[in-house]
Amino acid sequence: MSKKGREFKGIIGGENYKRVASLWGMKTEFYQKGLGNINLGAGMKAVDLGCGPGALSFALAENAHHDSSITGIDLSDDQINYAKKFTGNFRCALDFKKVSMDELPFENNSVDLVMTSMALHETPPEVRRGAVKEASRVLKKEGTFLLVDWCRPLSVAVRALWSPMLLFPKMSDNWNNVYPLLCEEAGFSIEEDYYISSIARRQVFIKNGGAR
Ligand SMILES: C[S@@+](CC[C@H](N)C(=O)[O-])C[C@H]1O[C@@H](n2cnc3c(N)ncnc32)[C@H](O)[C@@H]1O
């Protein structure tokens, strides 16, 4: 683990990661549910934090306007290089960069959508806090922050199975779903919040500041 997070490389990167993720139910349908009704219109720009092999970016690209762009960022060359093989399958502009999610190479107020799936929990607490602040900085007013990650399961039986997670202090942010509070502190309002599987939670935040 680098000090910025767990880098998925070698036997847990690229195609291997994709296979294992699919065994955990993270297939196309999972990412479509994560996106919900979010789409990318003409001229819009999206960023995918901890994009891995690009599944969430590709789900968004499927229906995105041809004049829009999506940039996936990840710590791992293996994930990014694998994702890059598929960019030609879509009409919109797709790019993948090696960057940490708490140091986004974008101007203030320049992005329409920041999204992330199953990645914040792979970072140290200070990095995920930095990532939420960065999402707020780069988003335009009323821009959308889509956060999909695991959370304390709703079902008591499933919760018992997952409770060993509590042995890892860095997992308590997810178990306790600290994200609405972090997002509120970073200038967001929560718009949607529901589970898309027994453990994965979809939360949509809107950057404050527009005329509502
Ligand atoms: C569990 S995978 C999720 C990948 C993808 N979003 C998905 O839904 O399949 C977590 C990813 O976050 C990346 N990662 C970890 N720390 C990071 C950081 N500080 N900045 C960017 N990516 C990071 C890892 O390399 C890995 O590809």
Image (cartoon, rainbow, N blue to C red):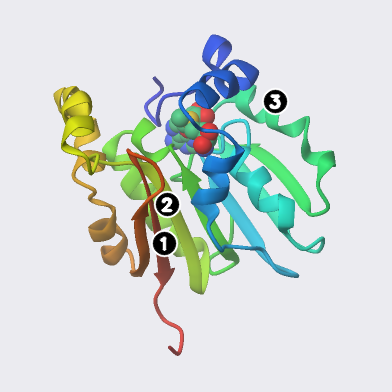
Quarter of image, res 63: bottom right
Of marks 1 and 2, which one's residue comes earlier in the chain? 2
Viewer-proximal residue, 60 or 98? 60
Residue 72 drawn at (x, y percent): 62, 43
Residue 46 drawn at (x, y percent): 62, 57
Relative to 203, is 174 on the left or the right? left
Q: Which residue is mark 1?
A: 204
Residue under the image location 60 percent in, 67 percent down = 110
SS under mark 1: strand
Picture layout, residue 63 above or below residue 42? above
Q: Residues within 10 Å of mark 1 (few under 14, many from 20)?
A: many
Disc 3 within 8 angstroms of ligand 1 (CB)? no
Of marks 3 and 1, which one's residue comes earlier in the chain? 3
Residue 21 drawn at (x, y percent): 51, 25
Q: Are marks 3 and 1 in contact (CB under 8 Å)?
A: no
SS under mark 3: helix
Quarter the N terminus occupies:
top left
Kind of residue indicated by mark 2: Leu
Q: How far apart are the alpha carbons under marks 3 and 1?
A: 28 Å
SS under mark 2: strand
Q: Which residue is mark 2?
A: 147
Disc 2 within 8 angstroms of ligand 1 (CB)? no
Q: Which residue is mark 3?
A: 82
Residue 128 drawn at (x, y percent): 35, 43
